[in-house]
Amino acid sequence: MFSLRLSQALDWLYPPRCRYCRESISKDEDYFCHACWAKIRLVSPPLCTRCGRPFLDAGGDDHLCGACLMHAPYFEKARSWACYPSEESEGHPLREIVQRFKYRRKVSLGKPLGRLMARGCYSFLSGCPVDLVIPVPLHPKRLRWRGFNQAVILAREVGRLWKLPVDPFILVRSRETPPQTQLAEEERRKNMRGAFSLNPAKPVDAKTILLVDDVYTSGATVNECSRTLLRAGAKEVYVLTLARTV
Ligand SMILES: [Zn+2]
Ligand SMILES: [Zn+2]
């Protein structure tokens, strides 16, 4: 009773606000206001059966995309919660919120974002026979600079909600990679080669792994992580990301 009154008083003192534009929101709206939700496009079919790329504004069934037909990825399936346009020109609530989380170190955004992803990808996650959740690692240098790994925060939320073990100490980023943004697809793949290694004290053999990251851009990073895990004997790798650029 007391805690109910306390939470009502807190709502009165600090009405819930949109995480992006700070507009006040009603109790039944989650995290974002109505106008911001309208801009956030959830990933929905039809999509690529492998990498989860949504075929925006197209009808029909799910099928393999051109990129997956050309180079089959190492992972079984990748899925993302929502997507946003890759061009920086227009402000987009999800892209901005991801950037605030990562680059402006708004660590408190991590848990709600992890929750949105873990709940929103229910049907994907319930179809993955996952033994272990592994976040995509940062290079130690970048980790020191940023102070936290955004993928670890998201992975922990998935683990908590799905009651799955999370281990951020298995996969190691052993080589620093130059920024990928200016590179073409083939170059991104080469750029990532050998960037990850595994902690020898933590075998992954015969395990089904769920890799978690914040954004799927070309897929080169999660593909290289998957290659490393499979070479070390992992059974299968699935990929879950909060967002995806389209
Ligand atoms: Zn808003
Ligand atoms: Zn694909």
Image (cartoon, grey):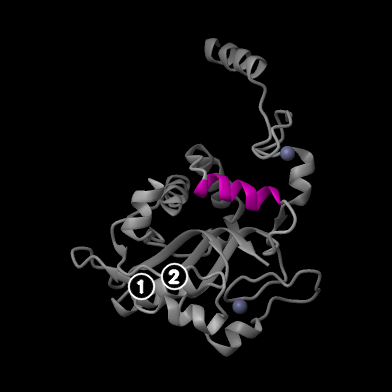
Residue drawn at point x = 59 percent, y = 56 percent: 121
Residue drawn at point x = 75 percent, y = 55 percent: 90
Q: Is residue 201 left or right of residue 99?
A: left
Q: Which residue is mark 1?
A: 195
**Secondary structure beneath label 1:** loop
Name the dominant secondary structure of the magenta segment. helix
Give residue 206's quadrant in the image: bottom left
Decide which of 14, 188 is in the foreground and name it: 188
Q: Which residue is mark 2?
A: 178
**Amino acid of disc 2:** Pro
Residue drawn at point x = 50 percent, y = 49 percent: 102
Is 200 rendered above or below residue 29? below
Residue 112 at x, y = what percent? 55, 41
Decide which of 149, 242 is in the foreground and name it: 149
Residue drawn at point x = 58 percent, y = 83 percent: 68
The span shown in magenta is 92-103
Residue 41 at x, y = what percent? 72, 56
Quadrant (top left/top right/bottom left/bottom right) for the N terminus: top right
Q: Quadrant of ligand 1?
A: top right
Please count the marks in the image.
Answer: 2
Q: Is residue 108 left or right of residue 61?
A: left
Decide which of 83, 3 is in the foreground and name it: 83
